[in-house]
Image (tube, rainbow, N blue to C red):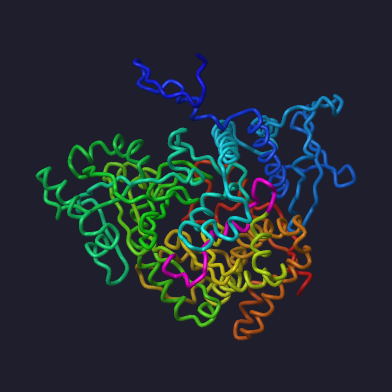
Amino acid sequence: MTATLSDPVTTSATTGIGAGHARQDVEHLTPERWAIANRHVLRKALSEFAHERLIVPIPEGNNSYLLASDDGAIEYRFTARRLQLDHWAIDGASIHRTRRGTVPSQGLALDVLDFITEFRGTLGVREDMLPLYLEEISSTLASHAYKQLADRPCSAELAKGVSAGVNPAADFQMIEMAMTEGHPCFVANNGRMGFGITDYRGFAPEAGAPVRLQWLAVHHSKAVFSASAGLEYRAHFEAELGAAALANFDSELTALSVDPADYLLMPVHPWQWENKLAVTFAAEIALRHLIPLSRGSEDYQAQQSIRTFFNTSTPERCYVKTALSVLNMGFMRGLSPAYMKATPAINDWLFTLIGADQTLMHHGLTMIREKAALGYHNAYFEAASIKGSPYRQMLSALWRESPLPLLGPGQQLATMASLLHVDGAGVPLASELIRRSGLGATQWLRRYLHAYLVPVVHCLFRYELAFMPHGENVILVLEHGVPVRAIMKDIGEEIALMGDDVEVPDEVSRIKVAIPEGERVLAVFTDVFDCIFRFLAATLVEDGALSEDEFWGTVAAVVHGYQSDHPELAEAFARHDLFADEFDLSCLNRLQLRNNKNMLDLGDPSGGLQMAGKLANPLAAFR
């Protein structure tokens, strides 16, 4: 009998692995899906590498372009619209690859792995980095093939809420799982180096699989717990786990003849336990500095950031963010115990600042605090490694508030990344939200900008404070499809106080970062205009919702309105001119291509930036 994927799994006596199981693992990898994935990722590679001026397509007339490989042997032709901010809106169906000198009918299959190798010199990938970058590209392609296989809700279903508003937590997590693109700028954005196929299906955000966290007891002499003012260790864990679960963990420790009072409880990613801690931290386990306990009893769902989990069993409880020694988009995704110590204090400081600012409160800005953190110090690796080493970031955790308690009646939550989402039929979620709202596209856009952009620019002008406000770091509160407020998250590691005018307590001083004054406005130009609005504008323009002038004119009008309301900040408006003719083009793919293991020193975010000339500012026309 010929085996099929639906056959019962039988066990191999020699390997212990189910026969036929391997085919089920890779059922998403078919020639048809692989071809679709390659066309999708190649379209993005051509667009983003051209935007960053790594490649220079040659115009051939009628919006057609030619690009030749480094050796001139392979040629790519495609059609594209050049939009504001030098965005290349490429027609994916038009991409054609041929060997030079052959007729067009003899086209070659599109293959992104080949493309990267064909342009390795142009892209500037070091020889020792190229295989790892290809591995990240391969993983990104495989992820896209998997997303084609899964049965996912369309944009219209996501816009109205899969549960029709009955269960906002379920609707929120369905949107989180349905995101298919990852970071809009990075070409290799689903690398996740370290995950095997079973790990992918168990822990990738798009898989949406329920996860139960592994728990450890960590000796208090090796670990530091910190929390928001007034929050004690025991009270925090009673709220997050419940008295019964705490008692069970205490019983496990007592049965091992150790005193539970000598240990702190720490959740860890199951992958981290299996692949890192159980081996790399063997000495700590043998010496009973670490004691493995049971898996937790509540289900969590991995978020887009991979190492953060949302509690689906009790959605009002905190997210849990864990250390994960997986390489993704230029960084090992660990968590530093040194950073954990100050994280709750930083969150308390920012929460107080937001609550005392009338403009931020008027526009509804809020945040979900990282209210507790626990970091483990491994003396062996701290003595043997430099500051910032991944070996110092293998065992920490933090707890971030849930956004569910912030919702009013009839409101929904959506990751801001969803505004760039396009479903399998080519329908943008943003367009469906506009249709659901009943507003015109420019009215809807204005409401969104008041909820998101105004708070971001106000923090720059008033405090010289910058968030990392990309789509995954912001949650939108929606009413009938309309964004009414923005919720900032991932605060402790990703905010920067760039000036000297605001005093902060010593325990918060880590957020003060030396950024040259001329670069501070890039917190809006790069992080908002180039990395979010460039894509949102293209999505809405290509879908026919509005024109480029309508999009950028609305952005300009909202900024003008804000500035008119705050004449006292006129000096800051001039110093950080959002209507300047042009601004520096800061390139993310160039960073990853230069060093895909550690693309930027987060302690000196300005020093390692990769610039490639200037971009014309779309707001300059509306000065």
Viewer can see residue 120: no
Viewer can see residue 277: yes
Q: Is residue 502 above or below residue 600?
A: below
Q: Is residue 309 above or below residue 466?
A: above
Towards the viewer: 458 or 6: 6
Towards the viewer: 475 or 227: 475
Q: Position of residue 273 (x, y in %)?
A: 32, 40
Q: Position of residue 75 (x, y in %)?
A: 79, 32
For the record, the magenta segment spans 404-427
Q: From the viewer's perspective, is 310 left or right of 579? A: left
Q: Is residue 385 above or below residue 493?
A: above
Q: Quadrant of the C terminus?
A: bottom right
Q: From the viewer's perspective, is 474 left or right of 576? A: left
| Total marks in image | 0
- Whether 44 is among the magenta residues is no
Towards the viewer: 188 or 251: 251
Q: Position of residue 177 (x, y in %)?
A: 51, 49
